[in-house]
Image (cartoon, helix red, strand yellow):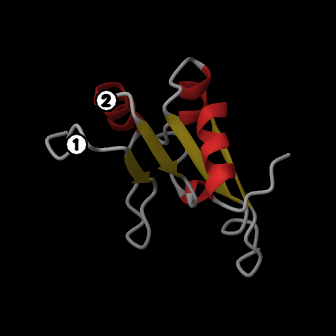
Amino acid sequence: MKNIAKKTKMVAVCNPNTPTGHSIDKDEIHRFIKEVPPDVIIMDEAYMEFADLDRFPDTISKFKSGCENLFIMRTLSKAYGLAGFRVGYGIGDERIIEILIDRFFIIHV
């Protein structure tokens, strides 16, 4: 937390991390989400299918229960043999998604 300043606009957390494979357990992630200032937190969960799902945080339920500063990114490319075909999805508040659509080429469905 000491590295998060007033000017911090985004905190990206890769869970599980690549290339180490280290996964932060759900209690630690939930505590972090609760303590971090209410700016955007990005959860990159690209390798979640390879993590211990009993210990893995349910960030989607955190978002659904009102944690609107979360933007959760996941991919189908890693676990389903689609490494050459980049397919993924993001879950987040409409305001965050609008910013992403305005700044990046994203197909919105």
Q: Viewer-proximal residue, 104 or 90? A: 104
Horizontal and vertical percent position of residue 31:
32, 29
Horizontal and vertical percent position of residue 48:
57, 54
Label 1–label 2 contact, CB within 8 A = yes
Which residue in the rendered view is the most extreme toward the front? Answer: 102
Horizontal and vertical percent position of residue 96:
59, 39
Instruction: Give the labeled residue for mark 1.
Output: 4
Q: Is residue 32 above or below residue 13?
A: above
Screen quadrant of the N terminus: top left
Which residue in the rendered view is the most extreme toward the right? Answer: 109
Mark 1 to mark 2 CA distance (whole Å): 8 Å
Residue at 73% across, 71% down? 86
Q: In terms of secondary structure, where does tag 2 sit?
A: loop
Q: In terms of secondary structure, where does tag 1 sit?
A: loop
In which quarter of the view is residue 6 placed?
top left
**Mark 2 is on which residue type?**
Pro
In which quarter of the view is residue 19 placed?
bottom left
Categorize mark 1 by other alpha carbons within 10 Å: few (<14), some (14-19), many (20+): few
Residue at 45% across, 53% down? 15
Categorize mark 2 by other alpha carbons within 10 Å: few (<14), some (14-19), many (20+): some
Q: Viewer-proximal residue, 22 or 95? A: 95
Left or right, residue 61 beside residue 31 = right
Q: Which mark is residue 30?
A: none
**Mark 1 is on which residue type?**
Ile
Horizontal and vertical percent position of residue 101:
69, 50
Residue at 55% across, 41% down? 71
Left or right, residue 107 beside residue 28 = right
- Mark earlier in primary sequence (1, 2): 1
Instruction: Give the labeled residue for mark 2.
Output: 37
Left or right, residue 53 beside residue 26 = right
Residue at 62% across, 50% down? 100
Which residue in the rendered view is the most extreme toward the bottom? Answer: 84
